[in-house]
Amino acid sequence: MVTRRTDPQEGRDALAAWALDPEGARRPVLAPAVRHTLELFAEEFPGGAVELRVPPYAAVQAVPGTRHTRGTPPAVVETDAATWLALVTGGLTWAEARDTGRLTASGERSDLSELLPLPGPRRTVRTALAAGAAEDPS
């Protein structure tokens, strides 16, 4: 079970703000958006076989399989905030991120391509973009 540290509404609001200005997003938006989506990922795919790191914001253990308690985990995925948010919302594929060096993945079960994007964050971004387009008079 994942211990929630991020208020779900705060996370959704931050994710929506990121969707409207991904290039301009700063720590007050990125931190709750990343933490919220990592928590959702860990809830959807509970386990400890993969450590998913998005420094400096958060890391979670997820995916069923061998659980580690000390030292280097058996599988590690690490990426930056913008890449993670694009992956989890469907704006970027796993293959695109891997092939362009935007993430590192090592160990068994570290290929998360079949697990991403997540429906909730994807829906949050689509809703935010649709609302933003409706408000834009141009």
Image: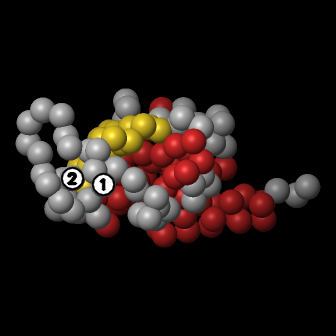
Rendering coords of residue 136 (x, y %): 82, 56
Please say whether residue 91 is visible from this viewpoint: yes
Q: Residue at x 29, y 64 (%)?
A: 45
Instruction: Report the residue marked by disc 1.
Output: 109
The quarter holding residue 99 reads top right
The amino acid type, in three-letter code, at marker 1 is Arg
User: What whole-number distance in Å separates the C-alpha atoms at marks 1 and 2?
Assistant: 7 Å
Q: Is residue 81 visible?
A: no
Residue occupying image coordinates x 41% and y 63%: 115
Callout 1 secondary element = loop
**Contact between labelled residues 2 and 1, with CB atoms less than 8 Å apart:** yes
Number of residues whose C-alpha sits closer than 10 Å to that of mark 1, classed few (under 14), some (14–19) or many (20 or more): some
Q: Quadrant of the C terminus?
A: bottom right
Residue mark closest to the camera, 1 vs 2: 1
**Image coords of residue 120 (percent x, y):** 47, 67
Residue drawn at point x = 8 percent, y = 36 percent: 70
- Extreme-left residue of the structure: 69
Specify the farthest residue to the top: 56
Question: What is the three-letter code of the residue carrying label 2?
Answer: Ala
Disc 2 target residue:
49
Q: Nearer the viewer, residue 23 or 105?
A: 105
Q: Residue at x 30, y 54 (%)?
A: 109
With respect to residue 67, does 30 lie above or below? above
> In this picture, is 54 found above or below 43?
above
Looking at marks 1 and 2 on the same chain, the residue that comes earlier in the sequence is marked by: 2
How many numbered dots are placed on residues in this image?
2
Q: Residues within 10 Å of mark 2 (few under 14, many from 20)?
A: many
Q: Is residue 93 left or right of residue 118?
A: right
